[in-house]
Image: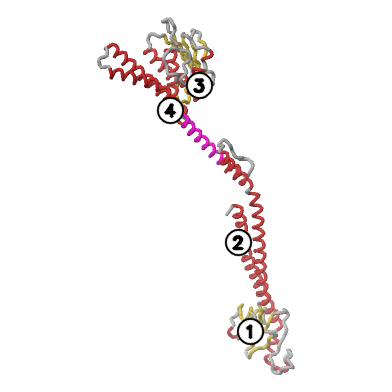
Amino acid sequence: MNLRLRVALAAIFSTGLVIIIAGITLIALISKDANNALDNRLEEQTIIVEKALAVDNTRKFFSIPRRINPIQTNQLTPNAIPTIRTIDVGIALRVISSTGVFLQSEGFPDIDDESMQFGYSNYNGEENNWRFLRQKIKEKVYDINLKTGQKTLRINDTNIVMIVGSSTENLEKTIANITNRFISVGIICSLLAGLIGWWLGGKALSPLYLLRNQTAKIRETSDLSFRVNAESGPYEINELANQMNQLLDTVEQETAIRERALLSAQDFAGNAAHELRTPLTSMITNLDILSSNPNLAEKERYEIIDELSEQQKRLINVLDGLRILAKGELAIEEIFESIDISEITDEIVSNAQKNASTIKIELSIEPSDYEMKGWSEGIKVMISNLMNNAIIHGQPKSNDHQIKVTLKQEIKKNIILIIEDNGPGIAIKERELIKERFKTGSSTSAGSGLGLALVDQQAKLHNGKLDIEISELGGAKFILFLAI
């Protein structure tokens, strides 16, 4: 069942429920008011009849013969009970004395008045239902004090009972007609509310239909960069669109991470197969020579073993470089932490000074705050590779090898690390080439071609860049910019 139909059905049921509750309440109030009005009519009729039957006349009636009764008898039916018409049309009257029925109006139902209780009561007849009021007629007598002349009211029982009643047929028909009309109007209003709900539901759900069409476009095109419109509908639809856009952001990011992981794995496999084939082949050849020539001269044996050791180190360096490259491509913000660039730089330069004591390495760190968010392993690899590059490839023809390391910070901007040497330098046409993987340019020094590729990757990962210029010392100058 679609949402629009549900809205229409909800309108029908809610309207019907409201009409039923309102109808029941209103009919109950109307019925109560009508019954109260009928009771008031009966009570007013008793007052009128009681005034008509004055006490003095009543006494005279019971003390004189019936023939001189001021109320005329029915001449057509001698000995019948006299009848009178009440002032209120539709009210039946019966007056009962100690000797029997004294007065009775036309149309009074044939009921046993002795079994009727005093006050209001209902009677279910064969043809009609009746509402009765039965009460006694009281005599008001004033006693006069002859000395003071003060009057005292005294009410005496006259032993006369008056019954007034009215048929409830019209009242019941009126209530029944009102009920039927409420039912008819309720059905019509419920159907009309359903039609209006169907129409309004279509209008209200149009932004949702638009959102559905937009999401279908994403499914058809598989374009995760597409975002649905979150400003054209009501608040709830816009919130749903915003949540969907956030979901698309998450899916797009996760998909990009998976794609990078897949490409990184493929790249790692391809690079490893390409770069490890030569050293592995050479190692196999040297091992075959050793195994097939047990009587090989000691000098030649040591040379082959040294070559195997160098090949093994190269393999380790290549694998380690490929590992860090792959990890750097998949690095996410969660692995970033607060690090101090000055401490890392000082530690790496100090180790280089110990291991390369013949090289003049100068470190200059300008006073500043070098705290930043970054990947600790990536930063260390980046600075270490720049130092190793200056040590290995920045060696001049003379024995006076110099390296200068400078760490400074632009005001509220980037952290700048400069490593320069007095070596042969790097040609302009090769400065971008050597940033690629396994590219060593025209350098004759041994290397895997991954060092500067790692530096360039980590610089971009930390929203920075790597520039290569000519140093004042005469060699290469590497300028590393890192965003704070």
At label 2, the amino acid type is Leu
Label 2 vs 1, first from the N-terminus? 2
Pinpoint residue 404: horizontal percent, then vertical percent: 46, 11
Q: Which residue is mark 3?
A: 482
Q: Which residue is mark 1?
A: 161
Label 3 vs 1, first from the N-terminus? 1
Q: Is residue 104 magenta?
A: no
User: Is the residue marked by circle 3 packed among few (<14), some (14-19), or many (20+) residues within 10 Å?
Assistant: many
User: Is the residue marked by circle 4 packed among few (<14), some (14-19), or many (20+) residues within 10 Å?
Assistant: few
Between tags 4 and 3, which lies in front? 4
Q: Main secondary structure of the magenta part?
A: helix
What is the span of residues highlighted in magenta in the rendered image?
243-264
At label 3, the amino acid type is Leu
Q: Which residue is mark 4?
A: 269
Label 3 vs 2, first from the N-terminus? 2
Q: Which residue is mark 2?
A: 17
Pinpoint residue 175: horizontal percent, then vertical percent: 66, 71
User: Is the residue marked by circle 2 packed among few (<14), some (14-19), or many (20+) residues within 10 Å?
Assistant: some
The one of 101 and 478 positioned closer to us in this rendering: 478
Q: Is residue 265 left or right of residue 186?
A: left
Mark 3 vs mark 2, CA separation in Å: 70 Å
